[in-house]
Image (cartoon, rainbow, N blue to C red):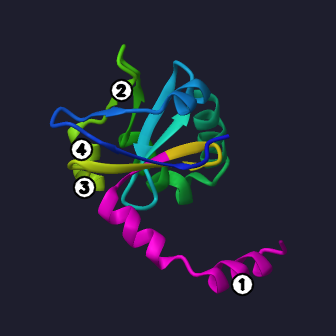
Amino acid sequence: MFYGEYKHTIDAKGRLFIPAKLREKLGENFILSRGFDKCVCVYPEDEWERFTAKIEELPFAKERRVRRYFYAYSEDGSIDAQGRVTVNKDFREFANLEKDVVIIGNRNHFEIWSAAAWEEEKNAFDNEDITNELIELGF
């Protein structure tokens, strides 16, 4: 399970240090993909398979755009000897990853956000709204 918030920097070549506790859970084979928001999602291979299996269950007429979105903008990832992953230019542009970034855990994957975008997202959290959402979901 991925959780927590980690502040790091990404260099001009797109290399980003991944904390050891996240690397251990990530494993050797993983996938980088566009997120629903302006972030990059990183899935362990088994979690990516579970995620995409749900997409495959949808009727083709409805899922084709979703498939294109995720499959066209996903790639295999690897960790170098210094514990870094390289985030390609397209992903960096999509998520506005320039220097200061935040890695956040999101249960079965983690997300890479620009520090500014993550700050904006955090400021949108409202305890009462979250409570109401949980109530609506039967929590």
Residues under numbered marks 3 and 4 in contact, where contact means CB atoms less than 8 Å apart:
no
As drawn, which residue projects farthest toward the right? 138
Is 133 magenta? The answer is: yes
Q: Comparing marks 2 and 1, which lies closer to the viewer?
A: 2
Residue 137 drawn above or below residue 71: below
Q: Earlier in the sequence, mark 2 or mark 4?
A: 2
Local crowd size for mark 2, using a 10 Å CA cut-off: few (<14), some (14–19), many (≥20)? some
Please tell me which residue is depicted at 64% across the width and 29% down the height of the picture: 46
Amino acid found under the numbered disc labelled 2: Arg
Q: Main secondary structure of the magenta part?
A: helix
For the residues marked 4 and 1, what is the alpha-carbon distance in whole angstroms?
A: 36 Å
Q: Secondary structure at mark 2?
A: strand
Q: Which residue lies under the disc numbered 2?
A: 84
125 sits left or right of 54 in the view: left
Dot 3: element: loop
Nearest the eye: 47 or 87: 87
Q: Is residue 49 above or below residue 132?
A: above
Which numbered disc, 1 or 3, marks the residue that appears first in the sequence? 3
Please, what secondary structure does the residue beneath circle 4 have?
Answer: helix
State the mark number for residue 96.
Answer: 3
Q: CA distance from mark 2 to mark 1?
A: 39 Å
Q: Which residue lies under the disc numbered 4? A: 90
* Residue beneath disc 1: 132
| Residue at mark 1 to residue at mark 3: CA–CA distance | 31 Å
- The residue positioned 54% from the left and 76% from the top of the image is 125
